[in-house]
Image (cartoon, rainbow, N blue to C red):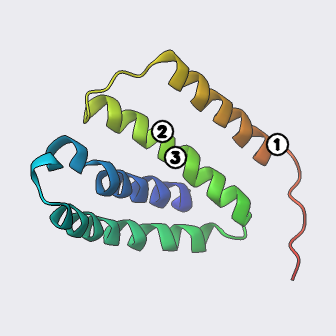
Amino acid sequence: MTTLFLLALSNIFMTFAWYGHLKFGADWPLWKVILISWGIALFEYCLAVPANRYGYGEFSGFQLKIIQEIITLIVFMIFAVLFLKEKLAWNYVVAFGFLGVAAFFAFAFKVPTTVT
């Protein structure tokens, strides 16, 4: 549970770092947007790295990445609708649904043993 919580928080920071400037940053010089984004991303790294370290073993590396991507999409959908004021079109929902099916296959079957 710690892993999922930390990954969710890290994705909130990263979504704002990558996409937050789209609402306000058109008037800002690119160098300023990059510096602000790096500052926000520092907090994301401080959450994502421990999330992956704690989660590895309970989850495989592949599963951690898939979890991260699913969380990223959920966070982004909320961000795009609430912050960017974009509409969530049916084709995006279908695309996210297919990614959910991909996540199902990643977790529904026995994970192969790790090679050392």
> Would you say residue 59 is visible in this rendering?
no
* Spatial CA span between label 1 and label 2: 20 Å
Labelled disc at residue 108: 1
Name the image quarter holding the N terminus. bottom right
| Viewer-proximal residue among 10 and 6 | 10
Q: Which residue does the image show at 87% across and 46% down from the upper left?
A: 109
Which residue occupies 88% across, 77% down? 115
Q: Quadrant of residue 24?
A: top left
Q: What residue type is labelled 2?
A: Ile
- Amino acid type, mark 3: Ile
Establish if 93 lies above or below 29: above
Nearer-N-terminus badge (1/2): 2
Q: What residue type is labelled 1?
A: Ala
Checking the image for residue 36, the label placed there is none
Q: Do the residues labelled 2 and 3 touch (CB within 8 Å)?
A: yes
**Residue 106 shows in this picture:** yes
71 left or right of 14? right
Q: Mark 2 points at which residue?
A: 74
Q: Residue at x 59, y 74 (%)?
A: 53
In the image, is residue 44 above or below residue 69? below
Q: State the image coordinates of residue 22 (x, y, percent, origin top left).
A: 24, 44
Mark 1 neighbour density, 10 Å: few (under 14) some (14–19) many (20 or more): few
Instruction: Say few, some or many: other residues with alpha carbon within 10 Å of mark 2 (under 14 / 14 to 19 / 20 or more).
Output: some
Q: In this view, does 41 lie to the left or right of 98?
A: left
Residue toward you, 1 or 40:
40
